[in-house]
Amino acid sequence: MNLPNYITLSRIFSVPIFMWLLSSSVFSSRNGEKELVASALFLLASITDGLDGYLARKRGQVTTIGMLLDPLADKLMIAAAFISLVQFNPRIVPAWIAVIIIGREFLVSGLRGIAASEGFTIQASDLGKLKMVVQIVSVVAVILDHRWLKWNIGPFIFPVDLIAQMSIWFMVAVSIVSAADYFVAFWSKIDRKASERRRRRPFVLSRRKHRELPPEVQPNP
């Protein structure tokens, strides 16, 4: 275990705490304490998502367990967030939206797993990185929307409810488009690999047949 792995583990351990915060009655929503603490925890966990990978590469501490735990922590955090938000703020996050977003995560994980078994990788696209940013904004906005429809900060008015609704719909759109992008990248590489196998197969069969012929009937070189 090293520092990047401990950071990843802290993100995993934050998942049940995050869910407890949103479902528990210990924290009051009267003054927004519950919403503020839950939002801060999600923001902190999201920051560690990039920090652990950066430190692992910079310090040369990329490990097998880290490669296993990092995507696991990501999927747990996303699933926990949207499952909790279905109950916490169903007006903004109905169940079908959570199904699409969580389903997208498992689809991409499955494609990456198959790709790894075939000997190639699917790099994170710009759409995937955009999805991460939209995901942070949408989750925090939906949590805050549970208590405030808008924030009045001096002369500025932040329409929390509008931001929450728009970011969630944008999140759904980006999730679908990025999933399609991953699938196209996966299929093109799988198709290319299958074509290479088909081209090599006649050559392999020819070599095998040549070896099986008795010496007296083999053609002279």
Image (cartoon, rainbow, N blue to C red):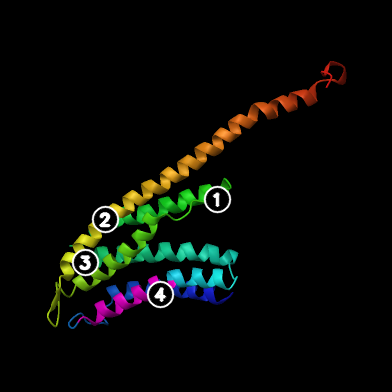
Of residues 198 and 108, which is closer to you in this image? Answer: 198
Q: Is residue 193 among the parts visible in the rendering?
A: yes
Image quarter where the C terminus lies is top right
| Residue 25 shows in the view | no
Q: CA distance from mark 2 to mark 1?
A: 29 Å
Crowd tier of the residue under label 1, counting other residues whose Cα lies within 10 Å: few below 14, some 14–19, many 20 or above: few
Q: From the image, tell me which residue sits under label 4.
A: 14
Local crowd size for mark 2, using a 10 Å CA cut-off: few (<14), some (14–19), many (≥20):
some
Tell me whether circle 2 and circle 4 mark residues in contact (CB < 8 Å). Answer: no
Earlier-in-chain disc, 3 versus 1 = 3
Question: Badge 2 is on which residue?
Answer: 97
Q: Mark 3 highlights which residue?
A: 89
Q: Which residues are magenta?
A: 32-48
Position of residue 42 measured from the top left corner of the image (x, y, whole percent): 34, 73
Mark 2: which amino acid? Ile
Q: How far across and how far down the image is residue 89, in percent?
A: 21, 66
Mark before the other along the chain sequence, 2 or 1: 2
Amino acid type indicated by mark 3: Asn
